[in-house]
Amino acid sequence: MKKLLDKKRISFLEYLEEHRGYSDLTIKSYDSSIREALEYIEILEEKEQTIFDLMPLRIYISELNSKTISKKLSAIRSFRTYLNENGMNIILKSDDSVKTAKTLPKPISHKYIIEALKESNLEEKLVVTMLYTLGLRVSELSSLKIEDISEEWIRVLGKGQKHRDIPLLASTKLLIDEYLSTITINKFLFEKKGEKLSENSLRYTVNKVFKGVSLKVSPHQLRHSYATALLNSGAPIVDVSELLGHASMATTQIYTKLGSALKQQNYHKAHPLSKVSG
């Protein structure tokens, strides 16, 4: 059975890449979780169904933090769903949910972004600007084609192979045009030897830019900064959710909590009575 499941694991990963549009990093995470699960879970075959008893796995990973455990179990559940949709009958045992705290993303202050860009070269500046002014995932920026960029919009291929259109700031378009005038591009906005620039290369670029102002920043934090800035300026959550390519508005709502927290902090800093002790 485990040999069969190992073959199914490979086809599942191919499915995630080809049909769901998952990034290389996400697919590697799924692969690692499923490999680990197949090593530790107990597999019982009963009549016309197969039971995956997750208890041995859960004992093995019990020392990890709840968020990591939840991600690993989520990968197993997705694999089970895939197997059941492809002719198998898998039942999960000991599959209780793990409660995880919703952590607030940490946006980067606009002034730090501007400061970091002052010492950046043209390509570095464009990478950071695209992430910050469009709210792209790093996988979406890596795959962005020249043909998908117009004067006022860009068309992005996101998760689940779904397209969405995002407004393009005039200043960002000018930066794109300036960059394109200095290089020869075949297909993608960011290329190396005719192939799209890898996600890791783009992450390195972001890290390098902000290292100059003594900050450690990820592309995802720039996406957070984009979302938070829009919501704090009064953009409707339904519009922001669509611009980010979220499947559900519930995912976007975490940014509204962050906005409220920032507003509260600013209020306490600004109001004169906040400094008066009782």
Image (cartoon, helix red, strand yellow):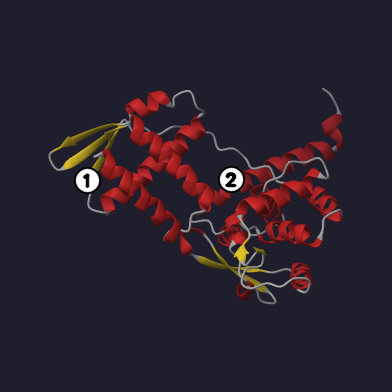
Instruction: Name the residue located 76 percent from the left edge and 57 percent from the top edge.
Output: 124
Using the rendered image of the protein, determine whether residue 269 is visible from the camera's viewpoint: yes
Q: Say what secondary structure mark 1 lies in.
A: loop
Query: Please, what is the three-letter code of the amino acid marked with disc 2?
Result: Ile
Q: What amino acid is at disc 1?
A: Asn
Relative height, residue 33 to residue 175 (above, below): above
Quarter of the figure with residue 170 = bottom right
Q: In this view, does 255 lie above or below 158?
A: above
Left or right of residue 241: residue 41 = left
The one nearer the camera, 36 or 275, is: 36
Q: Residue 167 carries which label?
A: none
Dividing the picture into quadrants, the one containing residue 227 is bottom right
| Disc 2 crowd, CA 10 A, few/some/many (<14, 14-19, 20+) | some
Q: Which residue is drawn at 61% across and 60% down?
A: 142
Residue at image position (22%, 52%) is: 87
- The image quadrant where one finds the C terminus is top right
- Looking at marks 1 and 2 on the same chain, the residue that comes earlier in the sequence is marked by 1
- The residue pinned by badge 1 equals 89
> Residue 24 at what x, y percent from top left?
52, 51
Q: What residue is pinned by disc 2?
A: 254
Element class at badge 2 = helix
